[in-house]
Each structure stands twice: as structure tokens, then as C-alpha cells.
Amino acid sequence: MPIYEFRCARCGVKTEKLCRLGETGESLSCPSCGRNELKKIFSLIQRKGRPGEDAGGGSSCGSCSSSNCGTCH
């Protein structure tokens, strides 16, 4: 089962839930305000490489998506 991110339409709190594929969030309640107004939000996947490799698998460093590490920080 995947982990989805949801944001409460009522209070704005973001939370992660382990859900079945296709879960809409309608049956889930907000951990902050208790309302059933969670909306699924788009989340990014973070991939971790082996020690000594960059996290992106390309020429970028693990802290950004730039292909030129001179632009980081």
C-alpha cells in the first residue's frame, strides 16, 4: 500500500496516510481538527542512492534538482 499526502481543507494541516490504491481521503479524518475534509495532494518521490552516489542518479547533487552543483546553496 502506498503512502499518500493529504491536506485538510478546513485547517490546512498536511498529513501522510498509508492507504489503498485510489484512496480519495473522503473517509479519513484530519489528525488536527478531526474533520473529514482531507484532499489528496501531489507529492514528490525522493530516491536515495547508494553511499557515494548522488540521490538523483544523474549529475545533480542530492539537495536540489539542478544539473550544475555550482548553483546549489
Image (cartoon, grey):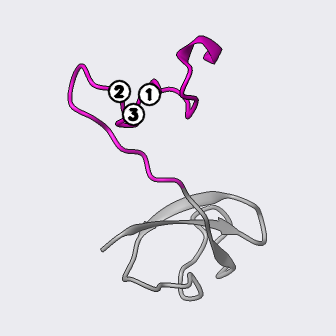
Rendered view: 54 above or below 40: above
Rendered view: 57 above or below 39: above
| Residue under the point 40% across and 37% down | 56
* 32 left or right of 1 in image: right
In the foreground, 2 or 13: 2
Circles 2 and 3: CB atoms closer than 8 Å:
yes
Q: Is residue 48 magenta?
A: yes
In the foreground, 59 or 46: 59
Give how far apart the Cα atoms at labels 3 and 1 are: 10 Å
- Per the image, the residue denoted by label 3 is 58
Dominant secondary structure of the residues highlighted in magenta in the image: loop
Magenta segment: 44-73
In the foreground, 54 or 41: 54
Confirm whether residue 73 shows in the render.
no
- Per the image, the residue denoted by label 2 is 54
Tag 2: amino acid:
Asp
Q: Which quarter of the rendered picture does the N terminus lie within? A: bottom left
In the foreground, 73 or 9: 73
Tag 3: amino acid:
Gly
Whole-percent x and y of residue 35? 68, 77
Rendered view: 13 above or below 38: above
Give how far apart the Cα atoms at labels 2 and 3 are: 7 Å
- Per the image, the residue denoted by label 1 is 62
Tag 1: amino acid:
Gly
**SS class, disc 2:** loop
| Residue under the point 36% across and 44% down | 47
Identify the image quadrant of residue 34: bottom right
Q: Which quarter of the rendered picture does the C terminus lie within? A: top right
